[in-house]
Structure formats: C-alpha cells, structure tokens
Image (cartoon, grey):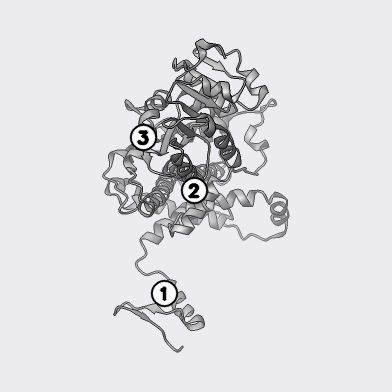
Amino acid sequence: MSPEREGRYRLGLLGLGVMGSALARNLIRREIPTALYSVSQKEREAHSLLEGPCVVCGTIGEFVGALERPRKIFLMILAGEPVDEMIQTLLPLLDPGDVLMDGGNSHYRDTERRCRLCREKGIGYLGIGVSGGEKGALTGPSLMAGGDRCAWEQAGPLLTQIAAFHRGKPCCGYVAEGGSGHYVKMAHNGIEYAILELIAETVCYLRGEAGLSPDQTGAVLERWNRGVLGSYLMEISARVIRKRDGDQTPLVDRILDVAGQKGTGRWSEEEAAARGVPTPSIYGALMARNLSGQNMLREEGAAAFPCTAQKGPLLTEEELEQALSLAVFLAYSQGFELIARAGKEEGWRINLRGLAGIWGDGCIIRGRILDRISESGFTGEKPLLFEPAFSDLRSGEAALRRLTSAAALAGDCFPAFGGALFYYDGYRTGRMPVFFIQALRDCFGAHTYRRTDREGSFHTEW
C-alpha cells in the first residue's frame, strides 16, 4: 500500500456480497472514508471502480493497515464458522482498543463467545443486527448493537451516520451487553415471519373466499396502508399482488408455494420454548414454511383427503382490516414478550420503547404500530397485549374470531391467524384445561400438583 493510504480510512468493511456491497455504497455516499476487502477476488474486482473516499484492498494486511487507529472493522460475511475464522485471522493484526463488528445474522450465543474472546485480547466487539435488506443497507438500515459498551462509544457515531432516521432520530442504538443486538434481530425476524404469513393468509382470503382480482386486492391493501396497518410490508404487498408476468398473468399465480428460511425464525421458536414464552403466531408461520416444503405430499393430500368445507357469510373489508390489525399487533406482542423475558434472564437492560424506535424506519417490520409502541407506557412488565393504549386494536377480537372460524370452516390453512387467536384467548382464560393434565401426570407418574385452596405440592393415590 502506498504511504498516503496508510491509516487514512475511518472504517473497514469486510465482505462485499449483496448486503456488504450496499453498505459500502451507503458509506461512500455519506463521504465516510472506507477501506473495502473481500476474500473473493471477483467481489474485489467488482468494486474496484467505485468512486468516492474508498479503497479496495488486495490483502487482509493491506486492509488492516489502511485503517486509522483505533481501527474499526465491520464484518458482513456469512454467519457461523466464517466469522470465527475471520476473527482468528484478524486478531494477530489488531491492537488493544480496536473494534470488531459483526453485522451478519449470527446466533447470539456465538456473539457472546466472541465478545469474551476479543475482550481477552483487549479488542472491543459488537454484534450488530442489521435490518432492511439490500435497499435498507443502501439507503439507511436499522442497526441494533449489542456487546462492549466502550466499543459502541467508539463506533456508534459512524454507524449512526449510515442508519435510517425516523422522526428526526437515528434508527440505530446500543441495545445492551453480550449478544443482545443479535438477539433482538432474531426476535425481529420472528415477528417478520408472523406478519408475512398473516398478510399472505389475508391475501388468500381476499383472492379465494372473497373472489377479488389482483388489482382489487391491491386496492384493498392500499386503503389499509393509509390506516393503522400502514407499514413497509403492507406497502410492498399492494405492489407485489399487482405485478404481471410477460403475458399479463398475475406473477404471484406462477410462484411456487414453497417458502425458504435462513434459520432466525427457528431460533426464535427454540428460544421461546426454552424460556417458556408463548409465541404461537411465530410458530404457526414457521410451521407453514416447513409444511410448504412438502408440496408433493400436499398435492397428493389435496386429491385424497375429504374436506367438509362450509361457505359462511363473507367478512366485510372493515372486519378483515380489524382482524389483521389485531393479529399484527399480537405478533409484535409475542416478539416483545420474548425479548423482555430474555432481557430479564440474561441481565440485559433493554429499553423496549427505544427498541421500537430503532425499528421505526429502515427495517422490514417498520410500521405505525411501532410508533404507537414507542410512544406508549410499555415497559415489558406485562405483555404488550395488556397495554391500555391499544384498546382500539383489542376491539378487533370479534373480527379475528370470525375470520379464524370462517377459515377453519372453509378448509383454509391459516396458522398465523389461528396462533394469534390462541395467544389472545390464552391470556383471557382464567382457568385452563391443564389442571386435568396435572391430575393425569400425578396419576401415571406421581409428578404432584398444586391446589387452589392451600399452599404446597400434593400427590394422590388415584
């Protein structure tokens, strides 16, 4: 490297795939001197003609040498072993006080382990949840940082410059210690799973039971987007449903009904099960994706299994809007409940309303309901469902019940709406059927039970 480039660049971005490339352009457009590197020669060559305050380095040593001290390196590489391998490559080249940041979808336990490893070397480490996809990375993502507080104080001002802004505030912030940044990104993705499935189920009702055309369906979604359901996902849903193929056939009618996933939805459910948090909407959305992969068996079942479908009265557009609004709100409630429980058990002091603000723009699940959460008195002591400020959404209970019942009678597979109703009814059920499970467990296994009229554990010879 020429001497004039040594120590000149404020940030190093390592990894120039789809997301890394978009972040690189974001940094350069904001005039932040950035050193770029990728282990892929093809990716390095593809970025060699970028104009602006940047340099594409040919070796990892040149890359590290280009950075001003204390060095700040942002990793945008595949989660898992590649991150561990890159950290091992970088650590001998770094000095105490330098900062490493991982912007991939790493598991939060891996992030905590890496925090400890880097701390032993005097290196600051941040696990950063990045939401917004390629477009968000390019124009301004939502950034959730967890890990070393001192590392955040060094790197935070740079990250804030490239983040989205909402209502005059950056959608970027320090969440808490350890793996908290990646944890809340995982829960964010769980909420995203649920909302995506809820919208898809609604579109199926509008196209199927209501018999609307793609353009009519898009018009309904656009109207809803002007109200409480206003959100990025509702906005693009109205656009996607109208998209035509070359011969003017609705493109969605030619898309195979097999959904992919990258693991964060499954992690959310594993965490929910381990921590005893009810997240049935997220679970329903995850199971829908799993079942979608059984498309050959589903086709066989469609021909072989009888269905006593019943066509009841159609829900009105207003009722559908109420049902979807409540179900989306309940998806947020489940995700925040998981985050609150993890924060309590891990000792993370997470500001939940502040987190809603970080998700205010740039991220996939941004929407007006999040604005209301950030403005409410929500603390996480109770699930968001109980927050008084959302009584208007809870009034959609009858519509949610009607839609879920209508779907069941018609033979429609709507697991996310069913999960939403289960969550709602679960929290309004004063006495659940599990009292009988406890009796049975004591009968066959002497597991004991507790009584309603006295303290202690009891066993009965049944």
First of labels 3, 2 by sequence position: 2
* Mark 3 or 2, closer to the camera: 3
Residue with the mark numbered 2: 109
Is residue 227 among the parts visible in the rendering? no
Residue with the mark numbered 3: 150
- Given residues 430 and 176, the one toward you in this image is 176
Residue with the mark numbered 1: 435
**Vertical comparison of 14 with 375: above or below:** above
Q: What is the x, y in percent for residue 72?
A: 45, 27
**Vertical comparison of 358 with 340: above or below:** above
Within 10 Å of disc 2 (Cα), the crowding (few <14, some 14-19, many 20+) is some
Q: Secondary structure at mark 3?
A: helix
Q: Secondary structure at mark 1?
A: helix
In this image, 200 relative to 425: left or right?
Answer: right
Q: What is the x, y in percent for residue 360?
A: 38, 33
Kindly identify the amino acid type of the residue bearing the numbered disc 1: Phe
First of labels 1, 3 by sequence position: 3
Q: Secondary structure at mark 2?
A: helix
Within 10 Å of disc 3 (Cα), the crowding (few <14, some 14-19, many 20+) is some
The label shown at residue 208 is none
